[in-house]
Amino acid sequence: MLIALATIGVILIAAFLSYVATRPDSFRIERVTNINAPPEKIFPLIDNFQQWEDWSPWEKVDPNLLRSYSGAASGKGAVYVWQGNREVGVGRMEIVESAPPSLVLIKIDFEEPMTAHNTIKFELERQDTTTRVTQAMYGPSPFLSKLFGIFCNMEQMVGGKFEEGLASLKALAEKPV
């Protein structure tokens, strides 16, 4: 009886791990908002990491967040390093492409609570009197990320933070000067 239960357990674990292995090898999370401001007003709020303190939802999660900036003040080569509580973790972002006023491409490296290397892309598109702002994060999904994704809805968790951040960015950009 014990051998039969152990065999069934091994088969179930193997089936579960096989299922995890068949999950997609990459991911993409994207959110969009329309802001009643020209892209020239919105772009500097994204292209300068020091401006993120005013709109990024992760800045509010840890009041004791340690941050440092290096490289260029804004645009390509600007670097932002953070160290925070368990929810914020430890990581680094670097702007690797900046095309005013329409594109900011960021390499993001998470070190804690888990290691991940992804890309964040902001696209700004003028539409009559508004600007369509798209924020996306994408990258590879190694086995541990696939396993984590079974138990945690990354689309909802990260997408929800993107929605918060874009709402704050919208409020900031639409604020009269």
Image (cartoon, helix red, strand yellow):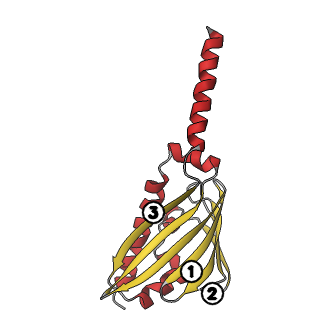
Name the residue at 56% across, 80% down.
50
Q: What residue is disc 3 on?
A: 161
Front label number (3 vs 1): 3
Which label sits on residue 89? none
Question: Which quarter of the figure has residue 7?
Answer: top right
| View extreme (left): residue | 129
The spot of residue 57 in percent (x, y) is: 47, 67
Q: What amino acid does circle 1 point to?
A: Gln
Name the residue at 43% across, 74% down.
134
| View extreme (front): residue | 22
Name the residue at 61% across, 78% down.
95
Which label sits on residue 50? 1
Badge 1 or badge 2: first in the primary sequence: 1
Q: Is residue 61 visible?
A: yes
Q: What residue is disc 2 on?
A: 73
The CA distance from mark 1 to mark 2 is 8 Å
The spot of residue 162 in percent (x, y) is: 45, 66
Would residue 125 be found to the left or right of residue 3 on screen? left
The CA distance from mark 2 to mark 3 is 25 Å
Q: Callout 2: few (<14), some (14-19), or many (20+) C-alpha neighbours within 10 Å?
A: some
Would residue 5 be found to the left or right of residue 58 on screen? right
Badge 2 or badge 3: first in the primary sequence: 2
Q: Eyeballing the image, is 65 above or below 34?
A: above
> Answer yes or no: do the residues labelled 1 and 2 have beta carbons within 8 Å?
yes
Question: Which quarter of the figure has residue 132?
Answer: bottom left
Q: What amino acid does circle 2 point to?
A: Ala
